Image: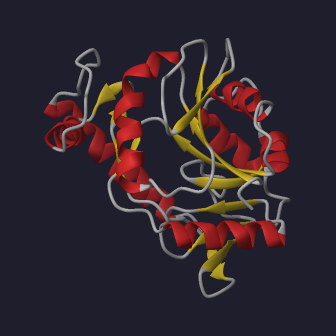
Amino acid sequence: MKDNVAVLISTYDGANDLWEPLEEAYKCYWNDCDFPIFLTSNHRSFESDLFRPLQIGKEKSWSDNILKSLDKINAKYVLLTFDDLFLNKKVDNSFIMRQCQWALDNNVDYLQFTKSVGAKQEFTREILKKNLSTEYRNATVFSLWNVEVLRSLLVDSENAWEFETKGNNRCRDLPHFYSTKKAGFSYLNGVVKGKWNPVVKNKLVKAGYNISPQRKSFSMLQLIKYEVIKAAYTFKRGCVK
């Protein structure tokens, strides 16, 4: 199985200040990961003993970034995540391995390792199956994808948000979309609209992470406004059936 699954961290050269603390988080909380972990970039390289740098050159969108990354990864499945999601609890690697093996054995299209919103039904003791009508059934965060299915859904002009909204309609006819009953990953979302969440930044600094001063932070007022909007959006998503 190790040769059939790869972790793909979506990033780009402009986020290079996040790579070192991100690597520290993975070393701390998922140092027993059995899969290769690829860190995409455009032209910059990153010296790492954990991440495998993956330089894709110029890109025109998030989706284009992912498509070009997939061209360079020899795996049947990719576990997709982002450069600003910092693990903050020990990952149960045996759980991740077990669910990935289940996905491979059953040739599933998609398996989400974070909380799934919308309509779903119990499929196994540890797995939920998403209904065809469920919104955001193709959520990107810590999501395991059959590479060919992911390729078929990506449009190279779309950003991640557009992929989750417009791409949601494109996956309506694909029945094998699942999520785990319990979250496989606990993380802090460190960056919002290009700026640090100051609360998360302070936690990382106190934990000893090397945080570059080059990136600005949200003011507390900006953060409060963002959290209110996010809570309303999350509530709306949770009510969608």
> Compared to 3, does 51 lie above or below?
above
Residue furthest to the front in view is 49
Q: Residue furthest bottom?
A: 125
Query: Residue at point 18% right, 44% down?
Result: 207
Task: Please state if 101 lies on the left or on the right of 25 as rendered.
Answer: right
**x and y, in percent, of residue 170 in the image:** 80, 47
Q: Position of residue 181 (x, y in %)?
A: 54, 76
Residue 131: tell me if it is visible.
no
Residue 41 percent coordinates (x, y): 58, 22
Left or right of residue 27: residue 39: right
Q: Nearer the viewer, residue 184 or 228?
A: 184
Q: How has the structure been colored for display? A: secondary structure
Which residue is at a point 69% across and 83% down the rendered structure image? 123
Left or right of residue 226, residue 194 in this image? right
Front-most of residues 87 and 171: 87
Residue 171 in view: yes
* Above or below, comparing residue 239 to residue 194 in the picture: below
The residue at the point 63 percent across, 58 percent down is 135
The image position of residue 188, as x and y in percent, is 33, 48
Quarter of the picture holding the C terminus: bottom right
